Amino acid sequence: MNRKGFTLIELLAVIILIALIAVLIVPNVLDTMTKSKEASYQLLLKNIVTSAKTYYEECEYGDLSNRTKYGSYACQIKNDTITTTLGTLANTGMLSVSDVDSEDKDKKVVLDPRDTTKDMSACQIKITKQKEETNINGIKTIKVTYIVTNEDKEDICPKEYGSEQ
């Protein structure tokens, strides 16, 4: 007998085998994707703290406070504190992001890596500079810490950022 093609049993066996492989692999792939997105988010938070420190230092020692040059992105220090947005950090080049506003290609946006439909650019943060002086054996040292906190009540904004010395 000359057979061409597969029997119904053979096709069912292949389909069951493919389904079994999918059942075993898909949860692992989804878990890996979730962990990867969370790791990206944690890295973004660390980058926000580092860029906030740089933004504060540029405001204090550089010309970032120049309203003529930087317009709405210019900063102002009040009581060792600056309030700004994540979008400002991105658009001044302090926070490195690759996403741009769909309506204004020159404007950078900060997207949540866990859900790229969430734009965090409008999230307000407060950058506070704290100094701690110590004197050991006549040697004066000053420890400077930059603390970044959430100033926004929106659910989309990160609740905690951290600090950097």
Image (cartoon, rainbow, N blue to C red):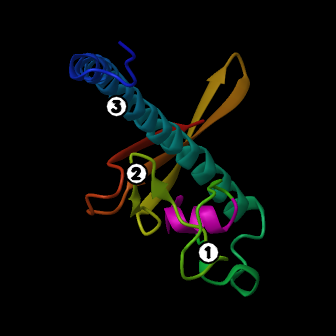
User: 10 Å neighbourhood of mark 1: few (<14), some, or many (≥20)?
Assistant: some
Give the distance between the C-alpha atoms of the residues marked 2 and 1, in whole angstroms: 24 Å
Q: Residue at x 64, y 77 (%)?
A: 105
For residue 32, which quarter of the picture?
Answer: top left
* Residue wearing tag 2: 149
Q: Could you tell me residue 7's position as x and y percent?
A: 27, 20
Q: Could you tell me residue 150's position as x and y percent?
A: 37, 55
The verdict on residue 4 being magenta is no
**Mark before the other along the chain sequence, 2 or 1:** 1
**Residue 118 is at least partly visible in this image:** yes
Type of amino acid at the residue the image marks with label 1? Lys
Per the rendering, the mark at residue 96 is none
Q: Which residues are magenta?
A: 77-93
* Residue wearing tag 3: 30
Query: In front of the other: label 2 or label 1?
Result: 1
Type of amino acid at the residue the image marks with label 2? Thr
Above or below — where is 16 with respect to 147? above
**Mark before the other along the chain sequence, 2 or 3:** 3
- Quarter of the image with the C terminus in it: top right
Give the distance between the C-alpha atoms of the residues marked 2 and 3, in whole angstroms: 32 Å
Q: Label 2's element?
A: strand
* Residue wearing tag 1: 107
Q: Could you tell me residue 93's position as x and y percent?
A: 70, 61
Residue 9 shown left or right of residue 98 in the figure: left
Q: Label 3's element?
A: helix
